[in-house]
């Protein structure tokens, strides 16, 4: 579920796990209806709960995509 808004992409994800790590929090979230899981590092003051839905703005210039089976980088290509 990606919508292009003002040349930026918006992604809706569902929070699965929240790991407070002190200065930052690691959120593991999934695309609704999918097995695709994202690891999202955020500031330590951000504390969503499992089941919450988050709307993320993605800067595609800083997005890396990896093959889940091989670990190889898919995008951006070298």
Image (cartoon, grey):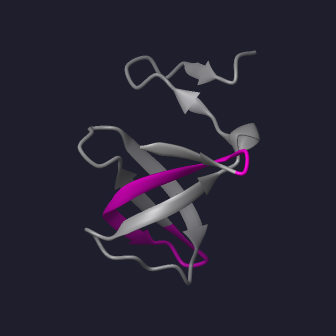
- Helix, strand or loop: magenta stretch: strand
Give the quadrant of residue 52: bottom left
41 lies left or right of 28:
right
Towards the viewer: 38 or 2: 2
Q: Is residue 67 above or below residue 32?
A: above
Number of callouts: 0
| Quarter placement of the N terminus | top left
Where's residue 55, x and y in %? 49, 62
Q: Give the residue drawn at x 43%, y 65%.
A: 54
| Quarter placement of the C terminus | top right
Q: Give the residue drawn at x 53%, y 46%.
A: 3
The residue positioned farthest toward the bottom in the image shown: 45
Q: Say if the magenta span includes residue 19.
A: yes
Towards the viewer: 58 or 62: 58
Towards the viewer: 69 or 12: 12
Q: Give the residue drawn at x 51%, y 56%.
A: 40
Q: Give the residues drawn in magenta, as a range.
A: 6-25
Where's residue 27, x and y in %? 43, 62
Towards the viewer: 21 or 7: 7
Q: Give the residue drawn at x 56%, y 30%.
A: 65
Where's residue 44, x and y in %? 56, 79
Q: Say if the magenta span includes residue 38.
A: no
Where's residue 70, x and y in %? 44, 17
């Amino acid at each position: 579920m990606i919508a292009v808004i003002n040349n930026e992409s918006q992604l809706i994800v569902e929070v699965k796990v929240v790991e407070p790590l002190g200065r930052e929090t690691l959120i593991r979230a999934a695309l609704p209806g999918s097995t695709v899981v994202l690891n999202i590092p955020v500031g330590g003051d951000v504390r969503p709960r499992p089941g919450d839905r988050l709307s993320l703005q993605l800067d595609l210039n800083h997005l890396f995509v990896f093959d889940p089976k091989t670990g190889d980088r898919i995008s951006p290509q070298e």
